[in-house]
Amino acid sequence: MDETIGGRYRLERKLGAGAMAEVWLATDTQLGRLVALKRLRADADPVRFEREAHAVASLSHPNIARLFDYGSEEGRPYMVFEHLPGGTLEDRLATGEPLDDSEAQTIATEIAAGLAHAHERGLVHRDLKPTNILFDEEGRARITDFGIARMSGADTLTEAGTLVGTAAYMSPEQASGGTITPASDVYSFGVIVFRMLTGRLPFESSNAVDLVRRQLYEAPPPITAIRPDAPQELAALAEESLAKEPRERPPDGRALVALLAGAAATTLGGAATQVMPGARTEVMEEPPRRWSPWLVGLIVLALLAIAAAAVAIIATQNNSNSPAPATTPLTPPP
């Protein structure tokens, strides 16, 4: 195909397609770089597409895919994102096996950091799932596809009670058409972490209606029942995130970042761990202790006193051990 969009984006090959849009690998002919171009299907709703563009444009974070450009060609809006060549989290989970614990910890931390940034700006994703987690050339996780996101204070895209999202990762309140909050994304995060640790979903069914029913009424199995050697802190966070009631979960991405910092410290043997949103987890050694100046002064004086005493003792011993001076014998008088 030799089609150029917006006078500069040459379509190379289709990366994927859904009910709303097609995603293409494209070349930005002006800057000479690869990009991902998301183009609205001819029969899709442009309002939802424009909503996603506005949502992503308000975000700037290392764990969220960057939006480069937005436009329209022949009545079809398009968005241009950075190209993320590392594949999706779904690709990594396709084997049905758990991820390595350190990898799961890192990915969970990066997803949480991206969510924290979005939540702080009043944005709820509402469709967080492994196919919407992509990796850049350095292997860093980035959240994508804010197509059904909801901004705080804005009108919802769908009417109350309408089911929006993906059933396997959908929170109970979302499944029942209830109020969506950042805690709804936390539930989806819990499903993702559950799957990373066990290789399977907490609820599995080939029937979407049955899957939604189970999300609403059934408790997920304990992670340790599936995998006894799973890291305890991360497993506990996943299970807490899967609470049926939103108020019983961590409230938002920022809370997840804080809790993950504690989980990382436990996993790494108690070392102090600093987790910054948008950055990979780094182990920080405890700084050396600093002694106060007055304490140092006392120690120096004590050492000087000990040294002086030692010198005095040595001098006394030397005097006592010295040979007596020679004497000249008296010559008797003639």
Image (cartoon, rainbow, N blue to C red):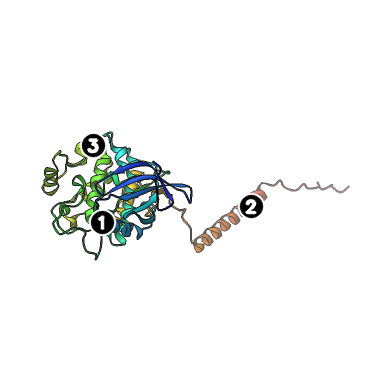
Q: Which mark is residue 268?
A: none
Label 1: element kind: helix
The location of residue 84, given as percent across then percent down, is 39, 45
Residue at mark 1: 48
* Mark 2 burial class by Cα count in 10 Å: few <14, some 14-19, many 20+: few
- 214 shown above or below 6: above
Residue at mark 2: 316
Q: Which residue type carries mark 2?
A: Thr
The location of residue 277, given as percent across then percent down, is 37, 54
Q: Quadrant of the N terminus?
A: top left
Q: Which mark is residue 228?
A: 3
Q: Which residue type carries mark 1?
A: Arg
Q: Is residue 205 left or right of residue 280?
A: left
* Mark 3 burial class by Cα count in 10 Å: few <14, some 14-19, many 20+: few
Inter-mark Cα distance, 3 to 2: 72 Å
Give 70 or 41, whichever is nearer the viewer: 41
